[in-house]
Image (tube, grey):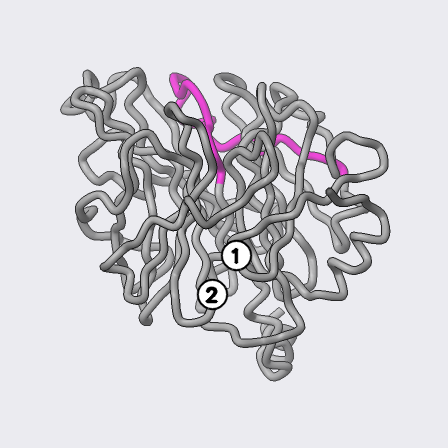
Amino acid sequence: MKKLLLQTMLVGWALSFISVGSLAASTATNDTLLFTFFREPNGQSGLQLATSTNGLTWTELKPPSGTGFILPEVGGKLMRDPSLALGPDGVFRLVWTTSWGRPPVFGYASSKDLIHWSMQEAIPVMENDPEAKNVWAPELFYDAKKDLWLIFWATTIPGKFSETENSGDNNHRIYYVSTKDFVHFSPTKLFYDGGFNVIDATILPANGKYYLIVKDETKNPVKKNLRLAVSENAEGPYGPAGPPISGDWVEGPSGIQIGSEFYIYFDHYGNPKYYGGIKSPDMEHWQDISASTSFPKGFRHGTVLRVPENLIRNLTSHTTTD
């Protein structure tokens, strides 16, 4: 694996495709942007995909079947919050929310071309906490320094974190496992506790550091906005979350660097409902760009990443666009 990773680094462009999280400032011209998403009511129609050349205008790719690129078959048979990443071995990994509650598992499948998929698996990750109510929005991140994958998600465990138990409908914290092969997983551990009810975490590396983007799920009083915590290492520990960088009633953040600027997309699920984003030159000063973006109708919480252009050409030959 280490030899393969070294060879990939020497090729030069490939590491910019590993995942949205491990993306460095890429200026490659032989790549394109891909966004996963799901549609209401709960993603039963499976994985949806859209592409863009500039990060603002997104065009949907539609499989000939008229359904998703992969239909949910495990857990509660939903496919919300699909998180997709491309590893140094050239394999795409996909994880997703399979249900609103139990069983506390996330869905997993892999593919080399986004057309042909492995058998789906339900990965149990909260077995040591039988009171765990859910596993929401699992997110992938490939840690190149340690040559392993991190998978993290939000779970509520009744009786834990009593200081915020009345802050909302649930009382989430972020948990995680790590793996090298998606067969053997580390024990589940707490990934982030910022002292508030939190969901929808994702990692965006920038300026030599790792930024954990989270949704402050506090409802009493209403916050429901995005905040950043910073670490020197992908696996943490992450420091205190900073002030809000978005408006209220947004969730499902996904970040990427485009040129010299950092973009964070989000799902604005309050009225009016829309998909939008913010951008920054330095991860400190943010500008809302929602009015300049265009997403397919019904677009919901997903992941943005870079992929090789030839893969999109191959994928497009099996799809229709509109």
Q: Which residue is mark 1?
A: 55
Q: Nearer the viewer, residue 288 or 179?
A: 288
Q: Is residue 134 magenta?
A: yes
Q: Secondary structure at mark 2?
A: strand
Determine whether 292 is above or below 133 in the image.
below
Instruction: Looking at this view, name the residue that lies furthest to the left.
Output: 163
Prevalent SS, magenta region? loop
Mark 2 surroundings: few (<14), some (14-19) or many (≥20) residues within 10 A: some
Q: Is residue 137 magenta?
A: yes
Position of 72 compared to 300: left or right? right
**Residue 259 horizontal/vertical position (percent):** 46, 71
In the rendered structure, are the residues bearing label 2 and label 1 in contact, judged by CB atoms less than 8 Å apart? Answer: yes
Q: Secondary structure at mark 1?
A: loop
Q: Nearer the viewer, residue 273 or 245?
A: 273
Instruction: Looking at this view, name the residue that lies furthest to the front.
Output: 291
**Residue 299 horizontal/vertical position (percent):** 56, 34
**Residue 189 horizontal/vertical position (percent):** 36, 40
The quarter of the picture where residue 91 lies is bottom right
Q: Is residue 186 visible?
A: no
**From which residue to which does the magenta span run?**
119-138
Looking at the rendered structure, the kind of residue marked 2 is Ile
* Label 2, label 1: how far apart the Cα atoms are: 8 Å
> At x 38% / y 28%, what residue is drawn?
155
Q: Is residue 208 visible?
A: yes
> At x 17% / y 45%, what residue is drawn?
243
**Residue 144 horizontal/vertical position (percent):** 49, 67
Q: Which residue is mark 2?
A: 258
Determine whether 298 is above or below 277 in the image.
above
Looking at the rendered structure, the kind of residue marked 1 is Gly
